[in-house]
Image (cartoon, rainbow, N blue to C red):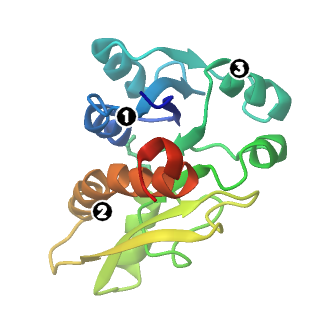
Amino acid sequence: MPPHVHLTLLASGSGSNAQVIWTHFAAHPVLRVGGVLTNKPDAGVIGKAEAAGIPWALIGSPADGPALVAQLAALGTDLVVLAGYLKRIPPEVVAAYTGRILNIHPSLLPHYGGKGMYGRRVHEAVLAAGEAETGLTIHLVDEQYDTGSILRQVRVPVLPHDTPDTLAQRVLREEHRHYAPTIAELAARLWPERLGTP
Ligand code: GRF
């Protein structure tokens, strides 16, 4: 039996992506969600994690890189998955997990990304600009917001009567379809011996 690859999810919000990810990998022989870390004591992801029996913990000081590295190490983290995590990842964490931190962003980066461009604001800006399409981007994380190398982009149409909410829902549905398979692909590239790829 190959040793497990441990995923730690970081989330600040409702955690719908996190929930899809731990459900997707629940029966996976190698990939395992070992825990969820959140910076928000009232985040929706906490209730979802408890209901699913996924261990969770608070990140006391999100800007304290060494503390976050220690928290990730204590969970045996191999891969860090940001799922609606709104704080900057400190440089010490990027250094400790270079090429092993993923994020999902609800637009076609480099458009509608960067500091302050998250959640509903992204979809409001896309609608205000009269775009015909938007989408999602799954990328590696570096020390800036939304600038790391892109692993996957998926296009989503903007429809005539869209509101920020209807557009957000359409993009989120696609996030739920694509995030876990992209995580699995990256893990297969990083640990081919454990995931059985040549
Ligand atoms: C998603 O739209 C994701 O792209 C963004 O934050 C949202 C998180 O939603 N980074 P949820 O918490 O997974 O429901």
The residue under label 3 is: 60
In which quarter of the view is residue 132 placed? bottom left
**Discs 3, 2 touching: Cβ within 8 Å:** no
Mark 1 vs mark 2: which is more N-terminal?
Answer: 1
State the CA–CA distance, disc 3 to disc 2: 32 Å
Closer to the eye: label 1 or 2: 1
Which quarter of the rendering shows the N terminus? top left
* Nearer-the-camera pick, 86 or 51: 51
Q: Amino acid at mark 2?
A: Pro
Is residue 99 visible in the rendered structure shown here?
Answer: yes
Say few, some or many: other residues with alpha carbon within 10 Å of mark 1 (under 14 / 14 to 19 / 20 or more). Answer: some
- Percent x, y of residue 13: 44, 35
Q: Does 90 appear above or below 29?
A: below
Q: Residue at x 70, y 47 (%)?
A: 88
Q: Amino acid at mark 1?
A: Ser
Mark 3 vs mark 2: which is more N-terminal?
Answer: 3
Q: Residue at x 28, y 62 (%)?
A: 171
Q: Residue at x 34, y 72 (%)?
A: 135
Query: Mark 1 near ligand 1 (CB under 8 Å)?
Result: yes
In which quarter of the view is residue 64 placed? top right
The residue under label 2 is: 164
Helix, strand or loop at mark 3: loop
Q: Does 192 appear above or below 69?
A: below
Helix, strand or loop at mark 1: loop
Q: Residue at x 46, y 14 (%)?
A: 55
- Percent x, y of residue 60: 71, 20
The residue under label 1 is: 14
Left or right of residue 42: residue 99? right
Q: Amino acid at mark 3?
A: Gly
